[in-house]
Amino acid sequence: MRIFLTTVGTIGVILSILIGCQHEVDIKTAQYAVNGQKVYRTHCQNCHGDKGEGLGNLYPPLTDTTFLQKNSDQLACIIKYGISGELEVAGKKFNNTMPASNLSSIDIAYVLTYINTKINKGKQIYSLEKVEKNLKKCN
Amino acid sequence: MISDKDFEGKVYIANFFFTHCPSICPTMNRNLLKIYQQYKDNEEVRFLSHSIDFKYDQPYVLKDYATKLGVTNNHWQFVSGTKAEIYGLANQYLVYTAEDKNAPGGYDHQGYLVLIDKDKKIRGAYDGTNDEQVKKLMNDLPLLLSEGKK
């Protein structure tokens, strides 16, 4: 009986730790998204729109999740250093210059998390580690 | 070439922008585009955007910008000119414009959408970056169009 209780107790503790961690990740994601909204409004919204809808054939939308996934490792570089030349997003061709933002790594992680979870319906955080790793490989 | 004649007897909305403006212009023109899409086939309404970047915004640059923005007819014109012409015009529309190295993109200006009546009088100025003000402009435009028709 005692062994049984201990086992139940241990499982209970492990479960609560797991749930606790799960919860913490969500809070962290939410916190990134809130900070990301501020960054987005200041640096992105004018061109890309408050819902990430873009503007005609001038500025691409940020709602093409296939594009975002495919280019996931380039997003930090694009935000930090800008981009020019032809891009195909959401089935439309764009050829314009996006200026460098020179945002810090943490602001880039915030804003990418905002784009992932608020502009789009994703659940995942875009971590600072991923931003830092990808920024080392910018062209 | 665009002249007064193109706007004779028209109600029109004027603004000042430049094509590679990173700050208020995209928002202002996104809002103006919404009004344009509603009124582009209305013969009484015109749109006139002045570029304050007299160095870079040549006619072909403006044409390309207009097409990409989604302007499909000549009811929305994009114009440029010499610095004196454009900045002088801005003063007549009571809109502040200036070359400023410290402003994003190199030019400082106000994002007003200026509503002009058929007698070429200014009837209103609305902040083109403020949704509430843009809504007000959308309400005022049909009122102005119905003026004198009763």
Image (cartoon, grey):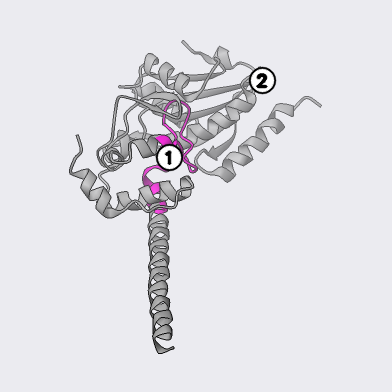
- The quadrant holding residue A43 is top left
Which amino acid does the dot numbered 2 rest on? Asn
Quarter of the figure with the C terminus of chain B = top right
Co-location on one chain, circles 2 and 1: no
- Decide which of A45, B84 is in the foreground and name it: A45
Disc 2 vs disc 1: Cβ atoms closer than 8 Å?
A: no
The chain containing the residue under callout 2 comes to B
Mark nearest the camera among 2 and 1 is 1
In the rendered image of this protein, does residue A109 appear above or below residue B11?
A: below
The answer to whether residue A125 is left or right of residue B113 is left
Q: Which residue is mark 1?
A: A46
Residue B62: image x %, image y %? Answer: 41, 19
Outermost residue, front direction? A1
Q: Is residue B101 visible?
A: yes
- Decide which of A54, A46 is in the foreground and name it: A54
Q: Residue at x 43, y 80 (%)?
A: A8
Outermost residue, top direction? B1
Q: Residue at x 38, y 14 (%)?
A: B60
Q: Is residue A54 magenta?
A: yes
Q: Is residue B110 visible?
A: no
The chain containing the residue under callout 1 comes to A
Q: Residues within 10 Å of mark 1 (few under 14, many from 20)?
A: many
Q: Which residue is mark 2?
A: B42
Could you tell me which secondary element the residue under label 2 belongs to? Answer: loop
Which amino acid does the dot numbered 1 rest on? Asn
Disc number placed over residue B99 in the picture, else none: none
The answer to whether residue B50 is left or right of residue B74 is left
Spatial distance from mark 2 to mark 1, Cα to Cα?
28 Å
Residue B126: image x %, image y %? Answer: 55, 39
Report the magenta residues as a range.
A37-66
Could you tell me which secondary element the residue under label 1 belongs to? Answer: helix
Residue B52: image x %, image y %? Answer: 38, 27
